[in-house]
Image: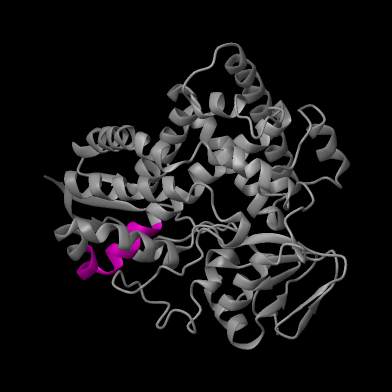
Amino acid sequence: MNLEEFPASDPEFWSHPEQFLEHSRATCPVTKLPGDAGYIMTRYDDVRAASVRVKEFSSNRPGFGQDDPELAAIAAQGLPEVATITTNDPPVHTRYRKLVNKAFTPEVVEGLEPKIRRLADDVFDSVAATGEMDFVGDFAEVLPTMVMSDALGIPYSMRQTFRTWSDNIVDMIAADMVLTPERRRECRRSYVEFQHYFADLIEERRDEPSDDMISQLVGARLNGERSLDVPELLDIIRILLVAGNDTTTNLLGGGLLALLDNPDQLAAVQADRMLIPQMIEEALRYVSPARWTIRVVADSGVEVAGCPIPAGEIARLAWGSANRDETRFPDADKFDIFRDSSAHMAFGHGVHFCIGKDLARSEARIAFEALFDHFGDFELTVPRAELQPLPVPGINRLNKLPIRFRVK
């Protein structure tokens, strides 16, 4: 595949990688990216198959900047980093996942729903008088942060700091290939701050347990094994922070924009709220909040679609591209809430299938229900061309979504 027309080292390129991904699916479904960015797999069947081949595509990958002495010196000011769920393989991964599953049972998620609804109502009430808002900045970024802050037992006064930590961690995971040295240092310092804050909070919960997720995790046991130590808990909280904030923000913003781009479907959902769950599934497929997940190829190397991938190479499982594969989803670039989107892989697939998927679905459903209860007659207040995804390679989040509305 000729990559000259696709400047993969340019952050702005990743705002609109669709043309590249489409070309890859059609001509070279396993594409070698420039530099040390590894390979990207873009077809649905290949991505799905690789996600369950855990012995060949390992999640046990290098940490952020571990080969950079300057970043290592900053990291040394924090606590040791331990791989738990997202950066581990079975059977070690299995133990951690079973422990964390206890915080995301259907009963736990159902118990959070009244609080989520109150928070959504409060945010919409706060902007109603103006008749306008930036749906991303005023709501899609705010609600998930408040929900996860509440779930973890963090005061709302920490909300902005909490969000900053989350965004910086996302950059460490999803944008490392395009970060400047200065930005890499900033992200690493931010992570050390995150570690110290939550390490103190963990010890507080050991002494005085509450009903929040941290207390549940501190006290979690499995088959009589030891409880999680502080470095393990910090990595799990890191995962919850990102999964509970970033991806839900991306789903909410991208989902509403897709509806605004398709007024007939927006009208249908407003008229029949029973369509909201299937609209969310289509938004998950169409938006794909996380563009890919990174795996590391095993020592023996692999071959996918006739392409050999050497041992130790990075392989990017491109969920976003798989969800636009025409062979699996006909007319895949069209947003259609009436299609069967159930086979999408926006939450991944296999042993790493998103642990917070039920909470994300519940939060999105309640958010759109509350939006349509409060407001109607939505319209953009800026030209459509101004609305662009952020230039972060691994995620799909809008830069803004300014709208005008009528208060009901």
Q: Nearer the viewer, residue 214 or 259?
A: 214
Residue lying furthest left in this view?
408
Residue at the bottom extreme of this rendering: 27
Position above or below: 156 against 15: above
Q: Which residue is rendered at x = 60% and y = 14% of the image?
A: 204
Please report the residue visible at 45 percent of the width from the left and 36 percent of the height from the top.
Answer: 145
Q: Is residue 216 depicted above or below 183 in this figure?
A: above
Q: Is residue 102 magenta?
A: no
Q: Is residue 387 left or right of residue 15?
A: left
Q: How is the image coloured?
A: one colour
- Residue 368, image x, y percentages: 28, 50
How many numbered marks does the figure carry?
0
Q: Main secondary structure of the magenta part?
A: helix
At which x and y percent is residue 36?
80, 64
Left or right, 308 with reference to 210: right
**Position of the C terminus by quadrant:** top left
Q: What's drawn in magenta, residue-wise? A: 254-266
| Percent x, y of residue 99 | 60, 37
Residue 393 seen anywhere in this rendered image of the structure: no
- Percent across and percent down for residue 275 are 24, 61
Q: Residue furthest top?
A: 207
- Nearer to us in this view, 369 or 9: 369
Which residue lies at the image location 53% right of the left edge and 48% below the top edge? 355
Decide if residue 300 is on the left or right side of residue 37. Answer: right
Looking at the rendered image, the quarter that the N terminus falls into is bottom right
Q: Is residue 256 magenta?
A: yes
Q: Quadrant of residue 382?
A: bottom left
Residue 238 appears anywhere in the view: yes
Q: Could you tell me which residue is drawn at 50 percent across and 25 percent down?
A: 158
